[in-house]
Amino acid sequence: MTATHDRARFLIIDDHPLFREALHSAVQMAYPEVDTVEARSITEALDLLADAKPFDLALLDLSMPDVHGFDGLLQLRTRYPRLPVVIVSGYEEPKIISEALSYGAAGFIPKSARKSDLAAAIRSVMEGAIYVPETYEGRPPDADSADRADMVQRLSTLTPQQLRVLQMLRQGLLNKQIAYELQVGETTVKAHVSEILRKLNVYSRTQAVIEVSKLDNAELFRDQAGF
């Protein structure tokens, strides 16, 4: 186990009650004594992760109401780099699996998997392996993958507050609106934006939004069936 407490703790992050129940059942099959906690959004998950008790594993759906693309995974990886995060998703395209792994996912389990396969995958990750479906054939890294990995590394240097500001920039909010949402002064927001630009090595907030948006691979998710 990665945590130092006696009972393992797993965090299930999915906005669909039926699939949270299915994941809970698979977890119980793999680890009958585990403590399972559920979150319906990334925001709720981050609140739970701020708890004093650490988690051993997070099971994350890519399609969440408060994030887009790989945003949820990136937030978890940058804020809790030691927490293994396994993607459990209805999106099963090889490119999506490759991208998830390149962003630090500890594994990728299709939602179409049987409960016994889910349980086996969870056990595999807890034993230190990187789980991928048997049908997955990894693709060699290309220049774009290297660029994305570099941007992920830069994102990992942002503080939690800077990540929140960056998310709001991506939503098109003005400094005044960001200041209101965060209950800080506009001068503080300007300082955060300056630090974000410096750490991401970009010259404008527009460029920051464009570069980070490339991580979404939004075209991969468009018109795809999934939860």
Image (spheres, rainbow, N blue to C red):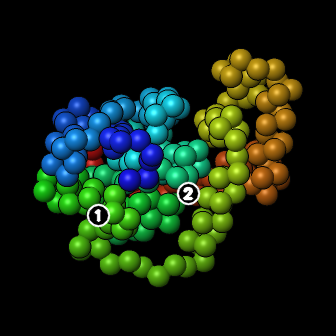
Query: On screen, 73 above or below 131?
Result: above
Residue 51, image x, y percentages: 49, 30
What is the tally of numbered marks visible in this picture? 2
| Residue beneath the point at 14% across and 52% down | 115
Residue 55, image x, y percentages: 42, 42
Q: Which of the 4 quarters of the picture holds residue 138?
A: bottom left
Q: Which of the 4 quarters of the picture holds residue 184?
A: top right
Residue that carries the numbered disc 1 in the rendered image: 124
Identify the mark at residue 215; answer none if there is no mark: 2
Judging from the image, what secondary structure is the residue with disc 2 in? helix
Which mark's residue is nearer the viewer, 2 or 1?
Answer: 1
| Residue beneath the point at 70% across and 41% down | 159
Q: Which of the 4 quarters of the picture holds residue 101?
A: bottom left
Badge 1 crowding class, 10 Å Cα cut-off, few under 14, some 14 to 19, many 20 or more, is: some
- Identify the mark nearer the N-term, 2 or 1: 1
Q: Is residue 63 visible?
A: no
- Which one is in front, 108 or 83? 83
Quadrant of the frame with the C terminus:
top left
Q: On the rendered structure, is 113 left or right of 87?
A: left
| Residue beneath the point at 60% across and 65% down | 148
- Which one is in front, 197 or 60? 60
Q: On the rendered structure, is 152 left or right of 191?
A: left
Residue 133, image x, y percentages: 26, 68
Residue 114, image x, y percentages: 13, 56
Query: On screen, 49 above or below 89?
Result: above
Q: Is residue 198 visible?
A: yes
Q: On the rendered structure, is 119 left or right of 38?
A: left
